[in-house]
Amino acid sequence: MRTRDASAAILGVGAYRPHRIVDNDTVGASTGRTAEWIQRRTGIQTRRYATAGETVADMAVEAARKAVADAGLAASDLHAVVVASMSNLRQSPGVAPEVAHRLGGHAAAFDVNAACAGFCSALALAASLVRDGSAGHVLVVGSDKMTDIVDPHDPTAGFLFADGAGAMVISSCDDDGVGPVVWGSDGGRAELIGHTATWLEYRDDPACAWPTMRMSGQEVFRWAIDAVPGIARAALNAAGIAVDDLDAFIPHQANLRIIDAIAQRLDLPPKVTVARDVVTSGNTSAASIPLATARLHELGVVARGGLALLVGFGAGLTWAAQVVRLP
């Protein structure tokens, strides 16, 4: 039996942002909203859209390559690849085996679908694989092409979502850098965020339109600002730290109003950097937390080894949160 006493930490971070930048005037014309209304209600100024030919896997590979390089590793060093996504349009096979193959390795590979909580859930699984001795280096990727699954004319969601991918390498180390996960779900409220129809309905009912993701915006907003602060505090307690010990707060980039409301309810001190990548990236679902983390990493605004609170929440309803040390 292998010894099961390893610690897990983030060794590298990478991001891929599609080249096309889309402003509020453009999405406003499609959704019937003004640019001013969109910015006031969401805080988003621009977002990135992938090209028609770009896939969830394409974006995941680009982010993964950067994370592996940032960790100082080669693809052959990876023992497992975990991809979090809710927008892959192929039922099977999953995205992760393709990512592992295109990186040039034969790592174990599987997908996770917990929507906007997917990355934090996948991160928890990766840390567990490292701690129990199953893997020394695990690549975790959040990649979503939301423009494939959201109606661009939807006046409640068409202006909100965007595309991108972010990745982290979780590795065995001397000191633990990934805190205990606090996670859960409320399937009784699944109707708040979800697709308009099943694939069976689309196949069998000639009147059924292509299924797209819809959201009850006001109800989701109220749920998030009421529930997420408690989830965040539980993650802090599980890690054995206080709010004052944090260097960064990196929540799911759902909406700037949600981010700021949660930060206010947590009573974060001024020294804590709050990730607001949503302003220029939009809501990228499972990609949003690693993209926001990569932005802070690129800017160097949080010192190496700084403590960050990650909180993901979304369709399901699902949530997952943990405290990590940033590379």
Image (spheres, rainbow, N blue to C red):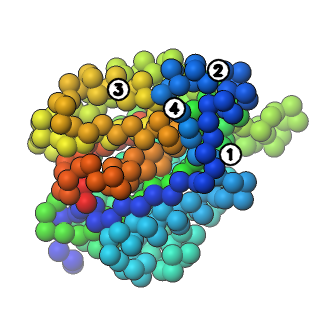
The quadrant of the rendering that contains the C terminus is bottom left
Q: In this view, does 223 lie to the left or right of 99?
A: left
Kind of residue at badge 4: Ile
Q: Residues within 10 Å of mark 2 (few under 14, many from 20)?
A: some
Between marks 4 and 3, how big is the CA–CA gap?
Answer: 13 Å
Kind of residue at badge 3: Asp
Position of residue 307 measured from the top left corner of the image (x, y, whole percent): 19, 48
Q: Residue at x 35, y 69 (%)?
A: 70
Q: Which residue is drawn at 46% across and 38% down?
A: 278
Secondary element under disc 3, as helix, strand or loop, is helix
Q: In this view, does 309 lie above or below 263?
A: below
Residue topped by disc 4? 44
Residue topped by disc 1? 148
Q: Which residue is drawn at 51% across and 20% down?
A: 40
Residue sitting farthest toward the right: 206
**Which label was assigned to residue 260?**
3
**Which label was assigned to residue 34?**
2
Q: How many labels does the image show?
A: 4
Q: Is residue 178 above or below residue 101?
A: above
